[in-house]
Image: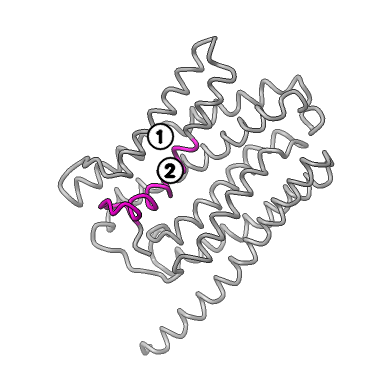
């Protein structure tokens, strides 16, 4: 097959992918809008429609990621475009899985759909969708395990924070949004259990990242900006878990630590890239495309 034919085929596939991704982003946007209508009107129909739209977006989004994996011949998170797509899809799928136990409570989906929309639009509007070959440092099992563990922990943290924010904002009116008062404690406890699941993922993600760094560059830790912020994120969630064992802190104060950890996670994923470029700080973790 000639180079021109390969180039034409790749361009066609990218064009199709972008069109599908735009459609998915629009569905995320429609879901967010309906979530806001649900919050404003307390209408169960709007909440149910918003929830179903998340399914309508997440399933083809997962298929799109699998297709890109097949086309690239590697895991789809080398570039920021790919990572943003993975970030959005994994968060939505995690929420859809967790939310099955609350048939009529849709509030956390508002934040999840907002993040999915934001990540998708950022990928589509400002990042290159081109499929890049793996650079030599990334051709490692440690790299793949590091990123997979980190992104799954991110997805869990997003859903947990969404639940915490909903609990803080609507705990006195939860019955008006489909969550009876007797279920409220279990709802709050779910946020805690999610962190109990996500914290080890982040921990092993950091350890596998250190092993990858040693394999690629001959050192386990270099206080790179993203490494530093990942440690900050880990520390905040460790404080959260400890606070859940202290009776005076296990309520609202613990929720605040959870949300603070979520903010630190966003800083680790995206904020560090922007700050490092803005301030000219060298980092091995800044995406090139």
Callout 1 secondary element: helix
In front of the other: label 1 or label 2? 2
The residue at which mark 2 appears reads as 267
The image quarter in which residue 167 lies: top right
Quick one: which residue is furthest to the left in this view? Answer: 218
**Residues at discs 1 and 2 in contact (Cβ within 8 Å):** yes
Which residue is at 66% across, 26% downward? 187
Residue positioned 46% across, 69% down in the render? 129
Label 2 CA crowd tier, 10 Å (few <14, some 14–19, many 20+): some
Q: Which residue is mark 1?
A: 233
Q: Position of residue 84 (x, y in %)?
A: 48, 56
Rendered image coloring scheme: one colour
Q: Is residue 199 placed above or below 45 in the rendered structure?
A: above
Along the line of sight, which residue is nearer the eye, 128 or 179?
Answer: 128
Residue 242 percent coordinates (x, y): 45, 18
Question: In this picture, is 232 found above or below 68?
Answer: above
Magenta residues?
Answer: 262-286
Left of 253 or right of it: where is 226? left
| Magenta stretch, overall SS | helix
The magenta stretch spans residue 21: no
Instruction: Say which quadrant the C terminus sits in.
Output: bottom left
């Amino acid at each position: 097959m000639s180079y021109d034919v390969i180039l034409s085929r790749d361009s066609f596939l990218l064009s199709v992918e972008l069109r599908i991704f735009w459609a998915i982003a629009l569905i995320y946007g429609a879901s967010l809008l309906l979530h806001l209508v649900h919050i404003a009107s307390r209408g169960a129909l709007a909440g149910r429609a918003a929830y179903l739209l998340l399914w309508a977006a997440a399933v083809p989004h997962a298929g799109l990621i699998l297709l890109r994996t097949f086309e690239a011949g590697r895991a789809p998170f080398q570039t920021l475009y790919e990572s943003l797509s993975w970030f959005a899809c994994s968060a939505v799928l995690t929420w859809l899985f967790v939310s099955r136990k609350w048939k009529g409570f849709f509030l956390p989906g508002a934040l999840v759909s907002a993040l999915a929309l934001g990540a998708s639009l950022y990928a589509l509007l400002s990042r290159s969708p081109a499929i890049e070959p793996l650079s030599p440092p990334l051709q490692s099992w440690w790299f793949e395990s590091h990123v997979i563990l980190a992104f799954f922990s991110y997805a869990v943290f997003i859903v947990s924070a969404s639940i915490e924010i909903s609990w803080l904002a609507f705990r006195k009116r939860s019955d008006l949004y489909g969550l009876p008062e007797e279920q409220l404690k279990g709802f709050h406890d779910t946020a805690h259990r999610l962190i109990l699941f996500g914290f080890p993922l982040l921990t092993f993600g950091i350890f596998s990242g250190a092993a990858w760094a040693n394999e690629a560059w001959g050192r386990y830790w270099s206080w790179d900006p993203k490494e530093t912020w990942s440690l900050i994120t880990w520390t905040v969630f460790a404080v959260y878990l400890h606070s859940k064992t202290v009776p005076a802190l296990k309520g609202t104060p613990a929720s605040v630590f959870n949300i603070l950890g979520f903010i630190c996670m966003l800083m680790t994923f995206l904020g560090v890239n922007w700050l490092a470029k803005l301030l000219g700080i060298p980092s091995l973790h800044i995406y090139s495309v």
